[in-house]
Amino acid sequence: MPVLTILTDDALSPPPNLDRLRELVEVRLSSAADLPALVRGADAVFGWDFFSGALREAWPAADRLRWLHVAAAGVDAMLFPELVDSEVVVTNATGQFDRPIAEFVAAQVLAEAKQLYPMHDLQQRKQWRHRETELIAGRRVLVVGTGGIGRAIARLLRALDMSVTGVGRVARETDPDFGTVLSSDRLAEHVCGVDHLVVIAPLTDSTRGMIDAQVLAALPDGAQVINVGRGALIDEQALIALLSTGRITAALDVVQTEPLPVDSPLWELPNVHLSPHMSGDVNGWRDRLAEQFEANLRRWLAGDELHGVVDKRAGYVRHG
Amino acid sequence: MPVLTILTDDALSPPPNLDRLRELVEVRLSSAADLPALVRGADAVFGWDFFSGALREAWPAADRLRWLHVAAAGVDAMLFPELVDSEVVVTNATGQFDRPIAEFVAAQVLAEAKQLYPMHDLQQRKQWRHRETELIAGRRVLVVGTGGIGRAIARLLRALDMSVTGVGRVARETDPDFGTVLSSDRLAEHVCGVDHLVVIAPLTDSTRGMIDAQVLAALPDGAQVINVGRGALIDEQALIALLSTGRITAALDVVQTEPLPVDSPLWELPNVHLSPHMSGDVNGWRDRLAEQFEANLRRWLAGDELHGVVDKRAGYVRHG
């Protein structure tokens, strides 16, 4: 019977389908600390604790590993050079976060346009003060990242009659979800005139810091930056500097260091709306991540093609 | 030259197209107090201050009045029995608020599902605390009111993949915007199982208090009431009593008495999100209301059919 090591954490409940997994394979539950011992002889690792860097430490002991499944969309925390160079197949939670994150982005776009946060603050002061808001129909959105989540965001915002354009590695004119995809090479030019900049690129060596000071400076007054990708995609110091001027607003579900350190200025900036890396985590998400892994496990045992295979050199699942 | 009296208020700027109106008709700008003097001899009144009850007081002096245009969707504040019984044609700002209010409703649906308000409060306490949210796709919405705004709400929430049903005077199965419209007679039965109850009916003798204690009691746990119609459509005391239990939530853009009195419990209930009757008031709304009136004025002068003619006995513009 193949051996599966589930990398988990004391703070996490084990996968709810653990009993079913045990019927399929020999299961070892492992903390990060125990992984060097428990990955030895394992054929597969399930990264249930999907932000853990423990496999890198345990890598010398991974003597039989053939497959790693990461229960997350972004696999940046799990990838390291030896794994990339190895024969180990890496899969991710492809698709699971597409719609939830798209809805979260729509929520933040609408909250900003309709001034829900300032009205909430006025209510706390018992102030009835009429305000004018913005129509989102026709507003321009640039979505940086053309993977499954970026595509779901584009579809949903287009359903809300917004004008959406994508940014990806390769420019194209007739994308089914975006219409036009612009090249990420000239981002500072592309952000001129956008009302909402949505960041959902995978974090790789090529994308780290891609929303740099120059790109941020090119944003028009009143633009909203929504980051639902990874904090390190944006130059956080440059972002904080710009936000401190009040010239733009931001909804940040991810930040460079998570949890956000208490001394970060982001906590207190009135034009920043923080959420604790949960834009995709809808009721039942953990159950569905476990079920998705189980379905992949059954494919793997049957010798069928796995879903969500990551291009390890690129750092993400290739779409389309 | 016909005489137009514009009912306005010191707090309001006059219509921005006043000079153009003056090329078309003899214009009198009138406060509420001056209306009895300034409505005499007037052929038309433009209710630029659309919540004013001044015409009722001035009615005996309205000796030539043939047309009243109200720069609002709901004409409840402007209608009174003598006006209803008269030959005076009443028109309203039909269409102007459809899309803005639909977007506002979508914003409040998403804010609730994505817990934006609690996260905002956590941010103010610098707490990074992961939360699970709700998917809105498939959630059930009941829209009470099948006029232009209700229809725009239905279309937008359906574009967000929500399951929308309408409630109107007349039940029907094949409505273009709602699919199914249920009869308002049995509202307490219809609200069973809804996730979001959107109230956008016109305020008339038939609809006043239609969301009564029985209807509210029938709402499922966790339901959200969104009122973008008129406060008096809901039994506010019953609503406050239910909200105080924490069993449901509410987003109220309108309340029984506006501005909301400072001693209202609605200010402080954590599951209530108030906005000061501005759900439809997007940037430029006053300009567009003035332009809409001017277009109707040109029709009126040319003897063409007016847009947005109110069925005065019903209390609203009939659609479809």
Image (cartoon, coloured by chain):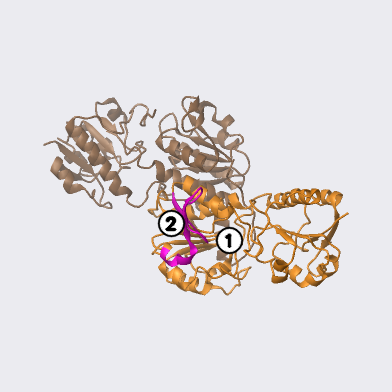
Chain colours: A orange, B brown
Residue closest to the eye, A70 or B267: A70
Residue range of the region highlighted in magenta in the rendering: A162-189
Q: Position of residue B271 (x, y in %)?
A: 56, 50
Q: Residue at x 61, y 54 (%)?
A: A280
Q: Amino acid at mark 2?
A: Gln
Question: Which element carries disc 1, helix, strand or loop?
Answer: loop
Please report, as a chain letter, where disc 2 is located.
A
Would you say residue A185 sits in the magenta stretch? yes
Q: Residue at x 61, y 65 (%)?
A: B127
Q: Is residue B200 left or right of residue A92?
A: left
- The residue lying at 23 percent from left, 50 percent from top is B16
Front residue (pair A192, A44): A44
- Mark 2 to mark 1: distance in Å? 26 Å
Do the residues at pointers 2 and 1 share their chain?
yes
Whether residue B277 is visible, yes or no, is yes
Q: Amino acid at mark 1?
A: Ser
Residue A275 disc label: 1
- Name the one closer to the observer, A280 or B150: A280
Q: Mark 2 highlights which residue?
A: A127
Element type at marker 2? loop
Res A220 → quadrant:
bottom left
Point 23% across, 33% down: residue: B67
Numbered circle sitting on residue B280: none
Task: Tell us which disc is closer to us: 2 or 1.
Answer: 1
**Which image quarter is the N terminus of chain A in?**
bottom right
Mark 2 crowdedness (10 Å alpha carbons): few <14, some 14-19, many ≥20: some
